[in-house]
Image (spheres, rainbow, N blue to C red):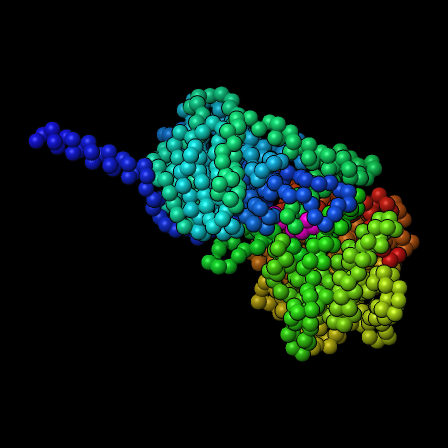
Amino acid sequence: MKGLNIFALISLLFCLSSIAQAKEAFGHPGIRANWSSAKKTNVGTFLEGGAKLSPVQRPQQKSLVWFTNTAGVLTEVFFPTIDLAQIKDSQLLVSDGKTFFQEEKDHLSHSVEIVTPYHSKLINRDKKGRFKITHSYFTLKDSSTLIDEIEVDVKRDGLSFYLLTNPHLNNTGAGDHAYVHGEGFKVVEGATNMLITSTVGFTHRSVGFVGSSDGHQDLSKNFQMNYHYTSARNGNIATTGRLNLPAKAGRYKFYVVYQFSQNDKALRPSGKKDYAPDKAAYLASWKNYLSTIKVPKNLSAERELLYKRSLFVLKTHEDKLNPGALIASLSVPWGETQYETHGADIGGYHLIWPRDLYHVAMGLLSAGDLASPMNALRFLKKIQYKKNSGQWDLSPRIIRKEGAFPQNTWVSGVEYWGGMQIDQVGYPIHLFYQVYLKVDAKTQQQMRQEFGVMLAKALNFIQTNGPWSQQERWEENFGISPSSFAVATSALVIGSKIFQNNFGKSLAKTANAWLHTPGDNIDTWTFTNSGVYDDGQYYLRVSGCQSYSAVWDPNNRQDCHVANSSRRVEQSQFLDQGFLKLALLGLKNADDYKLLTSQEKVNRHIRVKTPNGYGWYRYSFDAYGENGKGRLWPLLSSEHGRFAIERFRANNLSWKEAVKKVDTILESYQGFANTGMMIPEQVFENTGEGTGGATPLAWSHAEFIKLLWSKELRRNVENVLK
């Protein structure tokens, strides 16, 4: 009887052990999912193709992975398109099993070593000097695989290293299924599969639900890995594996491998132990591309590095299955605070705005990359509203969409937001003409055939519905805006050069009327003589923002809504620099008194000197930013620099005076860039460092490039009219 009891006890213990080793994790479905910080210090993807003109269709792409890094770790990873995130973050956890537990992201000090414009090392140091971790990320040429090359320098015995990954398959942190699989982990949602392995393997593995049974929760309790769950299904999940490294002081190098597929049968461990040749191929792909681009003369080493890194950033932001789909940023602004709601996709900035696309394409074009802007035009042609696209009911304005472009879209062309922005109808026309002026006569003829209908429909839309816009360039207020006006009206002038027939003549006539009709033109609509700033004379940010049918009177006292806040202010209090576009796009000479006096007000009231240089607010009372306050936008600085060059061309400044202004702004871009040389969307006034907004913002990098080339050429690269 006693022997039977012992046998029964052994059997029971074996069963309990089996259950512990092979059961579903607790805590379903995990905490509400959010995204990573937008403060990226690095981005990347394998580069196929170059800067030469390319056909519409490219060969089948095999490397369909993009990665980002923040705070020394891996953050959002995208596959198979640049707008579809699959990982929120992945990092190492470190413990001695007795007295401490640390995670890379929150507990270590971080630095970035820029090895080349396209290669960075992320270095994370224990603040007590016990260990150092170095990451180098790259993707493979022939498969959708991301590699994390890791070197750990351990100064004391007894340390264990764990890999913690929080997948967000198919752009959501919900609905993922995770399993201990083979030698690593498998994560599945729908047709999307991810395999996580390491070249050193794992001694312990577990999957769990974030906030309850994940590795962070496990290790933080007693500094040891006690959970060994083999499945965590349909939730916000995480995988945790103890890396098979010696618990002794020393230096160790290994690789973590993330493989992605939409075909389960195609997902198999590679068996490789050394990815050095693959890393060399990755670096060569970018070295080859940058060898084809132009570089302004006499740049300092630091400025040239930021220039080339900016081009790397812009080119990285292009989708591969949809060439020319250039997104705004590989980030979700203030991602930590962006919590998911079931069924509602969070697009962040990994979407395409025709406005941002234009500026990014212009940055690449300025450097001699003709292929990307040409493909951008093809993408725009694909997403342009067709005859059956419906209408905007903006009573009393009923506006047919045909010929316009969506406010923004996914790379598929499916629209995300649905506003009407007249400048985003004008920018594709500008981009066409910029490329057109840089190609030979044969290619020009081909471009006319390929894009003629697109241009005609867009021009007809502007002529019929402009210069009014439901949203100005900041996507917030309706009415008549000098910035939106300038883009749309100069597009009509460009159209008159492209279509040298009766249609072209009518476009020129319309543009001239909007500019010069006595008592009924851009100045009488938007230049106030009774404003609240200084002598009261300046261009408003927007006029007629009280109702869709409001009279465009810059001297009335009616108020307007301030987006992202509950405030309403008089339209005369809306001060911004959008009027600079009137000169930057060739509609006015830069010595115009109205422009100069308006810039004086802008510099006096919405410019701030930071430790890293001057920066400008988008407009007074801006509320888009931390704590309900808009901050300084580096992309705006380039407009002031290029306006100085326009003043030189108008004999209003000497070249020496213009260069002084330009160089001051170029220095600020170098100051605003973070440790990874990523230029942010916004910077704080007191530090000149990036906020939690989008970093990098592709548009910011594009403005730095455009200003460099404007200085090099002694002309503003955006002005094709004068």
Position of residue 37 measured from the top left corner of the image (x, y, whole percent): 55, 46
**Number of callouts:** 0
Residue 11: image quadrant is top left
Residue located 42% across and 23% down the image: 247
Q: Locate residue 603 relative to residue 319 in the image: left or right.
A: right
Foreground: 146 or 547? 146
Q: Locate residue 375 relative to residue 104 in the image: left or right.
A: right
Residue located 40% across and 41% down the image: 179
Residue extending farthest front: 265
Residue 535: image quadrant is bottom right
Position of residue 572 measured from the top left corner of the image (x, y, whole percent): 71, 69
Q: Which residues are magenta?
A: 323-331
Foreground: 699 or 540? 699
Q: Locate residue 511 relative to residue 466 in the image: left or right.
A: right
Is residue 329 magenta-colored?
yes
Q: Main secondary structure of the magenta part?
A: loop
Position of residue 341 measured from the top left corner of the image (x, y, whole percent): 47, 58
Would residue 352 be seen by someone viewing this image from the given angle? yes
Position of residue 374 measured from the top left corner of the image (x, y, whole percent): 76, 50
For residue 231, above or below residue 3:
below
Residue located 52% across and 26% down the image: 273
Foreground: 417 or 178? 178
Where is the N terminus found, in terms of image quarters? top left
Residue located 72% across and 50% down the image: 56
Would residue 584 be seen by someone viewing this image from the given angle? no
Q: Locate residue 571 relative to residue 527 in the image: left or right.
A: left
Residue extending farthest right: 651
